[in-house]
Image (tube, helix red, strand yellow):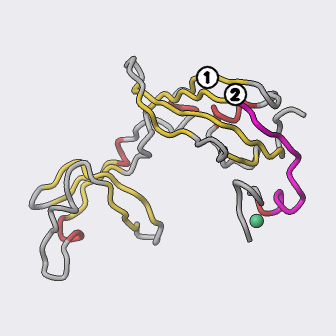
Amino acid sequence: MTIETNTVVSVSYHLTSKNSGETTESLVEKTKPGDPFVFLLGNGGLIEGFEKNLRGKKVGDKFDFYVPAEQGYGNIELENIVNIPANVFHDDKGKIDYEMVKVGKTLPMTDNEGNRMQGKVREVTGEHVRMDFNHPLAGQELHFVGEVLEIRAATAEELAHGHVHGPGGHHH
Ligand code: ZN
């Protein structure tokens, strides 16, 4: 069996990333022994470059590939970096908690439509807080190294739900 649309795949991998043009990669995440990454291929839940490079592989195949930002988490979009009025961050005493709202910190935010998002603080002034809502891996070239551990056909129920059930997936 090979990895194709509507298969459930288990892989072990480690992911490093770097800014394009740089040579030093830093570790983003890695799977632990006995706890692989399990995914349903072809439902749009994976980054394009990851899916593309795994298609056609078999159990036991090792992989080592790079994914440019355009096929990963996208480029950094300047329109995702915005100034938010400082009073949005006021606590009930009308003050900003500068321990929380601090350059480099990631804060949970909610947009006008109630969507939750994570933003990174870029700058804090008396008037505004500059927040970056780009994905933390936007603009990064990704490097995946790993091995295909298991491949099976997705069940009808998994296809209907659009996610994996059982080990490594949803339990419900
Ligand atoms: Zn389900």
- Queried whether the magenta region covers residue 55, the answer comes back as no
Q: Amino acid at mark 2?
A: Asn
In the picture provided, is 131 more to the left or to the right than 72? left
- Residue 151 lies in what quarter of the image? top right
Residue found 76% across the figure and 44% down from its top: 42
Residue linked to disc 1: 65
Residue found 46% across the figure and 70% down from its top: 113
Residue 74 in the image, given as x and y percentages of width and height? 50, 37
In the picture provided, is 3 more to the left or to the right than 136? right
Secondary structure found at label 1: strand
In the picture provided, is 60 more to the left or to the right than 129? right
Q: Residues within 10 Å of mark 2 (few under 14, many from 20)?
A: some
The range drawn in magenta is: 147-160
Q: Is residue 68 above or below residue 130?
A: above
- Residue 158 lies in what quarter of the image? bottom right
Residue linked to disc 2: 53
Residue 138 in the image, given as x and y percentages of width and height? 44, 38
Tell me the quadrant of the picture where the C terminus can be found.
bottom right
Badges 1 and 2: C-beta atoms under 8 Å apart? yes
Quarter of the image where ligand 1 sits: bottom right
Residue found 18% across the figure and 65% down from its top: 86
Tell me the quadrant of the picture where the N terminus can be found.
top right
Q: Amino acid at mark 1?
A: Phe
Task: Pick out the residue farthest to the front.
Answer: 33
Secondary structure found at label 2: helix
